Image (tube, rainbow, N blue to C red):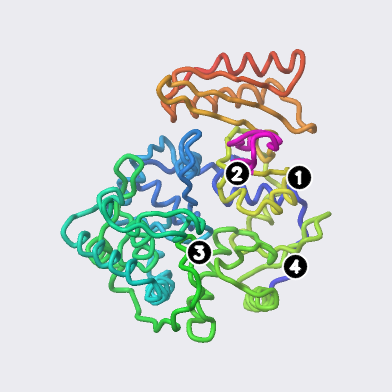
Amino acid sequence: MLPELQVSPQSAARALLAYYGLLRTTSAVPWRSTLAGTPGVHAALLRLEAVQVDPISAVERNHHLVLYNRVGGYRPEHLDELFRQGQALEYLANARCILPIESFPDFWPIMLQARANSETAGDVLRRSMDEVLAYAARVDAFSPREVGSDGPRLMGIGYNPDDVSSKASGRAIDLLWLGGQIMVSGRRGNDKLYTLTERHLPPSIRQQLVHVPAAPAADAPLRPWSPPEVRPDTNQPWRAMLLERYLRAFGIADTGDFRFGWQKWPAAERRAAVERLCEEGRLVPVRIEGVRRKYYAVPEFAALLAEAPNWQVRPEVRFIAPLDQLLWRRERVQDLFHFSYTWEVYIPETKRAFGYYAMPILYGDRLVGRIDPKLHRKQRHLELRRIGFEESFTPDDAFLAAFTEELSLFAAFHGAERVSAARIDLAGTLRQAVEKAVQSVEPKGE
């Protein structure tokens, strides 16, 4: 068993940023400096384990913002190409996520359980699933828009409340995808394209699949946003695999996370699991000064913790996507960065503290503020509806230069030709300085 590490919040924050490829120091460079193109996207997925997908498009979608911050010159087409090559997988991990195709065999037992659970679907939904599979067999790829428009509708299925109907074919696609019978193979505009898994999955991955007997179908609602539970009595190796993938994705984690292990783990089982991994030397217990929560780090992260106090950080600015892995555990953000973050997309406008799509501003190893961006696509105008900073941070010339540089790249990534700020939460000369920095932005490529 490895000894417990005692570290400062700053060291833990630096290590986390380096682990996620966002920090420049005398001994580490951001991934954006070394990764590029479609191969760079694949490398980023392998390092991150999972990138969360979200359809909200105030600016570019979350998964593209995450990859933009890790891959030099990133364009959404790079990810599309990775899907076309069969090198990316979309499935449920921290939520619906993009994963490297290498992870497919590890998720296979969950897909088989989901397939067994779908046997409880009613006759109408089962017939719709058969129809979708038959259509998929006739085409190379299809979008949900292509099937079931004239077919039956069902109430309260999938993402809908009990009093709202949806196409049976849409819910059929969800269940077939969750069961691994079809997989995302690309996009046409904003529409996902699906292909039969047996046709699209690379042979090298297909050869690794192992049949695992599923548990009897549970009499529970079919929820395409929630992975079925892998029973620990029959599928312990895959349950342990998911926990290890979760821990690698987080780098440093605590057992209080409701998504712990990407499965349902009772509190006692969580503690027993991390204690076992600590005894085996596969996790390192970590105490962060002034923090009550106890953390556990994978060995690669622990190595960064040991080095972090000696790093000389070279401050750069990044705008962090709301569902970036850096923000997956809000309590961790508070403990390490002393930064309180709430994604306010689903909060009524009158109750929002900052803004609809607030993105934290990273400056070096600190989270110093937020921007609330909105892209007006037809006008090619990037509007910062609000810019605000922590009370402990005062923008200086060095920050403003880095902020302007990153905002120029961010605007270019979005195809914006004009950038403006509607509200800046500063007064006097500081407000004027930030306003001048925004006005000086010239969208440019890297």
Report the Cα–Cα distance between label 4 and label 2: 39 Å
Q: Which mark is residue 4?
A: 4
Q: Are marks 1 and 3 in contact (CB under 8 Å)?
A: no
- Amino acid type, residue under disc 2 in the picture: Tyr
Q: Which mark is residue 425?
A: none
Residue on which disc 1 sits? 338
Q: Nearer the viewer, residue 364 or 360?
A: 360
Report the Cα–Cα distance between label 1 and label 3: 31 Å
Q: Kindly report which numbered mark, 4 or 1, lies closer to the viewer in this rendering.
A: 1
Task: Classify 10 Å Cα crowding around label 3: few (below 14), some (14-19), many (20 and above).
Answer: some
Does residue 175 lie above or below 88 as drawn? below
> SS for tag 3?
loop
Task: Classify 10 Å Cα crowding around label 1: few (below 14), some (14-19), many (20 and above).
Answer: some
- Left or right of 229, for residue 122: left
> SS for tag 2?
loop
Dot 2 or dot 1, earlier in sequence: 1
Q: Which mark is residue 346?
A: 2
Where residue 396 sits, quadrant-wise, is: top right
Q: Is residue 354 magenta?
A: yes
Question: Is residue 33 something one can see in this rendering?
Answer: no
Q: Are marks 3 and 2 in contact (CB under 8 Å)?
A: no
Report the Cα–Cα distance between label 2 and label 1: 24 Å
Task: Classify 10 Å Cα crowding around label 4: few (below 14), some (14-19), many (20 and above).
Answer: some
Magenta stretch: dominant SS?
A: loop
Task: Classify 10 Å Cα crowding around label 2: few (below 14), some (14-19), many (20 and above).
Answer: few
Q: Kindly report which numbered mark, 2 or 1, lies closer to the viewer in this rendering.
A: 2
Which image quarter holds the N terminus? bottom right
- Amino acid type, residue under disc 4 in the picture: Glu
